[in-house]
């Protein structure tokens, strides 16, 4: 089992969700986050004053999948989240050693 965590631009969420639904992904967790990388933030003007925005709004998507689906899910997220501009985000893939569905007590692949 794999946990895929992707940091994407907020306006790309619907495209990513639709692609994942098409692959058979049954659920995901989405969190509003802020951060920066090479993009380093930007400046904005508000009421005539210029100020720096160091942390930009992003979304963190977490998806738990069977190991054989990890590559397809990663490719789908990368394809749908890409704008070609700096700040498109990152995808992290890590192993899951154990999963328990709280309601039924199912474990591991059955719990996904």
Image (cartoon, grey):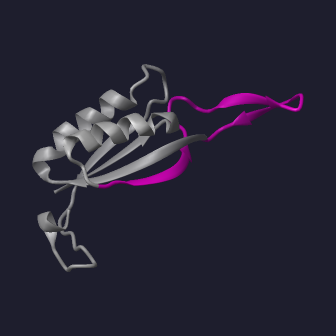
Residue 63 painted magenta: no
In this rendering, the count of numbered labels is: 0
Q: Is residue 49 left or right of residue 58?
A: right
The C terminus lies in quadrant: bottom left
Q: Which residues are magenta?
A: 27-55
Q: Is residue 25 left or right of residue 34?
A: left
Q: Quadrant of residue 91?
A: top left
Residue in the image at 24% along x and 73% along y = 101
Residue 74 picture location, percent across and down: 25, 38
- Residue 80 screen position, x and y as percent: 35, 30
**In the rendered view, would you say 15 is above or below 96?**
above
x and y percentages locating residue 82 in the rendered image? 39, 26
**Picture residue at 13% right of the left edge, 63% below the top:** 109
Q: Which residue extends farthest right?
A: 48
Name the image quarter holding residue 18.
Answer: top left
Is 36 displayed left or right of 67 in the figure? Answer: right
Above or below for 52 versus 101: above
The quadrant of the rendering that contains the N terminus is bottom left
- Residue at image position (31%, 55%) is 27
Q: Provide residue 53's location: percent of width, then percent of height.
A: 69, 37
Q: Residue furthest top?
A: 84
Q: Which residue is located at x 19 percent, y 68 percent?
A: 111
Res 78 → quadrant: top left
| Residue 28 drawn in magenta | yes
Whether 94 is drawn above or below 80: the answer is: below
Compared to residue 4, the image places residue 90 above or below, namely: above
Q: Nearer the viewer, residue 7 or 20?
A: 20
């Amino acid at each position: 089992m794999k946990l895929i965590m992707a940091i994407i631009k907020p306006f790309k969420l619907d495209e990513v969700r639709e692609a994942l639904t098409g692959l058979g992904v049954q659920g995901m967790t989405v969190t509003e986050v802020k951060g920066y990388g090479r993009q380093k933030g930007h400046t904005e003007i508000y009421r005539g004053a210029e100020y720096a925005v160091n942390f930009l709004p992003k979304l963190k998507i977490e998806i738990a999948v069977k190991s054989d689906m990890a590559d397809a899910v990663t490719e789908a997220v990368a394809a749908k989240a890409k704008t070609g501009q700096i700040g498109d985000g990152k995808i992290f893939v890590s192993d899951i050693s154990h999963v328990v569905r709280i309601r039924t007590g199912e474990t591991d692949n059955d719990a996904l």
